[in-house]
């Protein structure tokens, strides 16, 4: 269940439709600050891809955190989305791969600031999850 569904009662595409991208980013900001607040137990935060563009988000999560950039080529990303690509307003148009390529060009410098980069083009979701657990365990000594 996505936090947007729980907090707003709407899916991300519905929030985009009613509040625009600024509304989505405002929800992201509120939830990021909650996750970074005092007394919050460890959490796995999986924000939308545009989350990284807000400097306040990145600043809020400084400190004891393990950042992992799940790198994927634009063509593979779009193929994985299949028909769900139509639910992503920023990818609307005749060429979702071109849209992803453009967004990646704008965001990748931020993504590369993560502690780790995991190239996921040829990995299964289970393999990706196992790598993330191993990376986090190595950093925390667990």
Image (cartoon, rainbow, N blue to C red):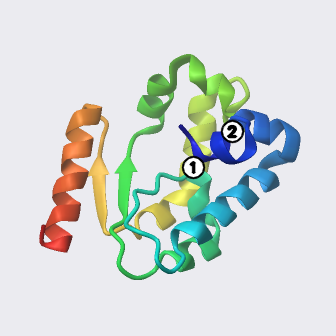
**Residue 121 picture location, percent across and down:** 31, 36
Q: Residue at x 45, y 61 (%)?
A: 111
Residue position marked by numbered label 2 in the rendering: 12
The furthest residue to the top: 83
Q: Residue at x 50, y 80 (%)?
A: 38
Q: Is residue 83 above or below residue 58?
A: above
Q: Residue at x 55, y 50 (%)?
A: 49
Report the label total.
2
**Residue 130 picture location, percent across and down:** 19, 45
Residue position marked by numbered label 1 in the rendering: 48
Q: CA distance from mark 2 to mark 1?
A: 10 Å
Q: Which of the two residues, 112 or 62, is positioned nearer the viewer here?
A: 62
**Residue 69 picture location, percent across and down:** 38, 56
Q: Residue at x 37, y 65 (%)?
A: 67
Mark 2 vs mark 1: in front: 2
Circles 2 and 1 in contact, beta carbons < 8 Å: yes
Q: Quadrant of the C terminus?
A: bottom left
Can residue 122 be seen? Answer: no
Can residue 125 be seen? Answer: yes
Residue 110 shown left or right of residue 133 in the figure: right
């Amino acid at each position: 269940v996505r936090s947007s569904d729980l907090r707003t009662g709407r899916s991300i595409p519905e929030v985009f439709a009613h509040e625009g991208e600024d509304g989505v980013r405002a929800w992201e900001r509120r939830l990021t600050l909650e996750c970074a607040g005092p007394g919050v137990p460890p959490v796995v935060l999986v924000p939308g891809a545009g989350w990284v563009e807000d400097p306040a988000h990145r600043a809020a999560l400084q400190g004891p955190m393990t950042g992992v950039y799940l790198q994927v080529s634009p063509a593979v990303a779009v193929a994985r989305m299949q028909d769900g690509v139509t639910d992503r307003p920023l990818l609307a148009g005749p060429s979702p791969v071109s849209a992803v390529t453009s967004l990646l060009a704008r965001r990748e410098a931020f993504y590369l600031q993560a502690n780790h980069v995991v190239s996921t083009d040829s990995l299964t979701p289970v393999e990706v999850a196992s790598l993330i657990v191993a990376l986090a365990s190595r950093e925390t000594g667990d």
